[in-house]
Amino acid sequence: MDLIRQLCKNNAGAREICHTLLKRCANLNKLNEGKIIHALLLNSRFSDDLVMQNTLLNMYAKCGDLVNARKLFDEMSIRDVVTWTALITGYSQHDGPQAALLLLPEMLRIGLKPNQFTLASLLKAASGAGSTDVLQGRQLHGLCLKCGYDSNVYVSCAILDMYARCDHLEEAQLIFDVMVSKNEVSWNSLIAGYARKGQGDKAFCLFSNMLRENVEPTHFTYSIVLCACASMGSLEQGKWIHALMIKWGEKLVAFVGNTLLDMYAKSGSIEDAEKVFDRLVKRDVVSWNSMLTGYAQHGQGKVTLQRFEEMLRIKIAPNDITFLCVLTACSHAGLLDEGHHCFDMMKKYNVEPQILHYVTMVDLLGRAGHLDRAKQFISELPIKPTAAVWGALLGACRMHKNMELGGYAAERIFELDSHYPGTHVLLYNIYALAGRWNDAARVRKMMKESGVKKEPACSWVEMENEVHMFVADDDAHAQRREIHNIWEQISDKIKEIGYVPDSSHVLLCMDQQEREAKLQYHSEKLALAFALLNTPPGSTIRIKKNIRICGDCHSAFKFVSKLIEREIIVRDTNRFHHFCDGSCSCGDYW
C-alpha cells in the first residue's frame, strides 16, 4: 500500500494502476481492499477525477455496498451516464429494484439519455421483485423504442426476460419472434419463462428448436430444461438431455450437476440420482440437500439419516433446507425420536427454525398418532401459528379420523385464511369417513358459498413423448374399452389372492354395492390398466397423480405388483410409492 500511496502522489501511470486495481477488487468482490484504495485516493490528485470516481462507485456497487456507493454518488460534483448506470446496476443486482427505478426520472430530468446498459439494468429491476405487474416494464419498453435501442441484442434480451419474469409469456414470445439476432441469452430467457410458469412441454419444445438452430446450450440452459423435466416427472426426456450432455463433454459441475440429480430423484429414479451424486465433480450443501430430498420423497427415511450423518462427518455444514429434508424423511417414515433429535440439533448449528420446520414437526407428530402432542407443540411455538401449521394438524386428524380436533384445527385455519387450499376438502372427508353426512353437506355448502372447488383427481402416464391423462370413470380415451376390460380382469385376479375393496374411500352417500363399483374406475387404476396394455412385460410402470393416492388404490397396487411381477412407481403430491412383490416402499405409513 505504501507503493500505491507513492504512485498516487508522483507517478503519471498511477491513475491507470489504481483504475485496474479497483476493477480487480470489483470482479473479485474484495470490498475491504477497495476501501483502502479509496482512502488513499481521497488525499491524491485523483480525488475529483470523474473516471476514477466512476470506477470507485462501480466497485462499491458490484461488491454490494450500496450505502457507500450512494454516499459517493451524492458527493460527486459531476456525474455522467456511466455514474448513473453504475448505481442503477448496483441496486438492480442487489435487491433494490425500486431504488434503481426511482433514479431514472432524476437522470432524465437533468437531460442525460440512458444507454443500453442503463436500460438493461432498469428492465432487470422492473422484474426484480418477481411482480406480475408489468406496467413499469412496459413503460421502459416504450423508452427503449424512443431511444432507438429496441433492435439492440443486449436490450432486446432484457425486454424479453422482463416480460418472461412478469409471467407475460405471450409478449415475451412476440419479442423473441421478431428478434433479428437470437443468442443463447434470449433462448434461455424464454425457456426459463415457460419452465417457471409450469409449461414444461413448451420449454422442452423450445429447447429442441434451439438445438435445430445450432445454438449451443449453456449450463444454464441444461439446468432450466432439467428443472422442467423434474416438475413434470419426465424421466425419458431427462435421460435424453443427460445423454446430450455426455455427448458434448459436459462435466457434472456446480448447479447443472445438482439439477440433473434433482431431475432423476423427482422423476422416480433414485438409483440414477445416486449415480449422479457419486460422480459430481464437487459436492456442496446443495448437492447433499438434493440427495436427502430425493431419499425423503422416496420414503427412505433411514438412508436419509445415514447420509445426513455422513454429511456431518465430512464437515459439510447443514442449513435450514438440510434440516427440512431430514425432518420430512422422518415424518414420512415414522421416525419420531430421530425427528425430534434432528429438530433439537438445529440449535447446535445455529439454524433458526422457520415456519416449514414447525409444519413438518406437527406433521411428524400427527402422522405418528400423537395428535394431542402435536396440538401442544403448536401452543408452545415461539411464533403465531399459521394456516399451514394448523393444516398439518388437520391432515393428521383426517388420517386418524379425529373429528373433534379436526374441526378445531379447521376453525383456526378459517380464522387465519378462509381460502387456505384443501381445508374444506379435508374437513368434508373427516365427516364423510365418520358417516356424518349432515356435517359433510354443511361443509359442501360452505365450499359453494365461498367459491371453493375441489381439485379433480387425475393420473397420467408418459409414453413415447406423449402424455395419457385419466380422470375417474374416464370414458374419453381411445382405448377405453380395452382399459376397462383389462382392469376388470386384473381386479378379479387380485381378489383371488387377497385384495378386498375398501369402500370407505368412496366419500359419497350411497350403498355398499355402488361404492365398490365406484372404486374400480379411479384415475390411477385406469392409468395402470393403460400402462399394462401398452408397455412390454417386465418393464417398470410409472404413474403420476396430482393429489394423494387413494387408500384402496394403494392396496390394489400392492396386489397387482405381485400378480404381474413388475415394479409400479406412483408419484403423488406428497411422495413416491414403489410397489414391488406385494409391498410398498412407504411400509403403509403414509
Image (spheres, helix red, strand yellow):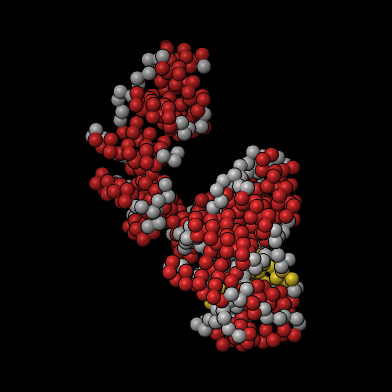
Tag count in the figure? 0
- Quarter of the rendering occupied by the C terminus: bottom right
Q: Nearer the viewer, residue 208 or 328?
A: 328
- From where the camera sits, is residue 66 visible? yes
Check the image and report above or below for 148 versus 575: above
Q: Nearer the viewer, residue 36 or 150?
A: 36
256 displayed left or right of 345: left
Image spot of residue 343 (x, y percent): 68, 47
Check the image and report above or below for 581 versus 414: below
- From where the camera sits, is residue 263 visible? no
Check the image and report above or below for 477 versus 244: below
408 displayed left or right of 169: right
Residue at x-position 36% and y-position 61% = 170
Residue at x-position 66% and y-position 76% = 552
463 displayed left or right of 48: right
Q: In the rendered image, which quarter is residue 537 located in?
A: bottom right
Q: Nearer the viewer, residue 494 or 258?
A: 494
Q: In the rendered image, which quarter is residue 517 located in?
A: bottom right
Image spot of residue 274 (x, y percent): 69, 56
Q: In the rendered image, which quarter is residue 119 located in?
A: top left
Image spot of residue 164 (x, y percent): 40, 55
Check the image and report above or below for 342 versus 196: above
Q: Nearer the viewer, residue 412 or 498?
A: 412
Image spot of residue 585 (x, y percent): 72, 65
Residue at x-position 34% and y-position 31% = 83
Residue at x-position 59% and y-position 75% = 436
